[in-house]
Amino acid sequence: MKYSVKSCQDIISDPANYLEEPEVFNDWIVEGDLAIVCSDSNSGKTVLCSDIAISNAVGLCYWNEPFSDRSRKVVYVDGELSNRQV
C-alpha cells in the first residue's frame, strides 16, 4: 500500500480543494453533507426534512425557491416517528 504525505500548505494551495459542491437546500445543505436537524417537539422538523428529501429524490420543489437542481438518491432517517405516524 502506498501512502502520500502532503503538508498543510500543499492542501491549502491546491485549487481542487476549493470546488463547491452543488446545493441541496439553499446554502444550508450541500451535496455530501450529513444534516442533523434538532429542535423542540412539534416544531416541524419532520415536515421540513420530508419535504427536502422528497424534493431532492424526485426533483419537485414545493416552494418558490428552486433548491433542487436535479434528482438525487436520498437517505432519510427519522428517529421520532411512531407506528401511527408512519
Image (cartoon, rainbow, N blue to C red):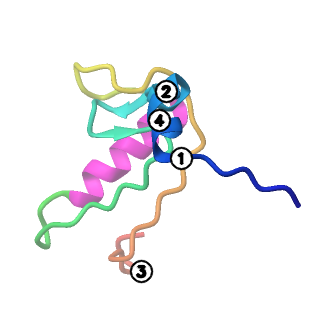
Residue identifier under label 4: 56
Which element carries disc 1, helix, strand or loop?
loop
Q: Position of residue 7 (x, y in %)?
A: 53, 46
First-in-chain label (1 vs 3)? 1
User: Which residue is more in the foreground, 79 or 38?
Assistant: 38
Q: CA distance from mark 1 to mark 3?
A: 52 Å
Q: CA distance from mark 3 to mark 2?
A: 28 Å
Q: Are dots 3 and 4 in contact, CB under 8 Å?
A: no
First-in-chain label (3 vs 2)? 2
Q: Are dots 1 and 3 in contact, CB under 8 Å?
A: no
Quarter holding the N terminus is bottom right
Residue located at (26% from left, 49% from top): 48
Decide: few, some or many residues near mark 4? Use Cα within 10 Å; few <14, some 14-19, many ≥20: many
Residue located at (32% from left, 77% from top): 80
Instruction: Please say if 68 is above or below 80.
Output: above
Q: Nearer the viewer, mark 3 or mark 4?
A: 4
Residue 21 in view: no
- Looking at the rendered structure, the kind of residue marked 1 is Ser
Residue identifier under label 2: 59
Decide: few, some or many residues near mark 1? Use Cα within 10 Å; few <14, some 14-19, many ≥20: few
- Looking at the rendered structure, the kind of residue marked 2 is Gly
Q: CA distance from mark 3 to mark 4?
A: 25 Å
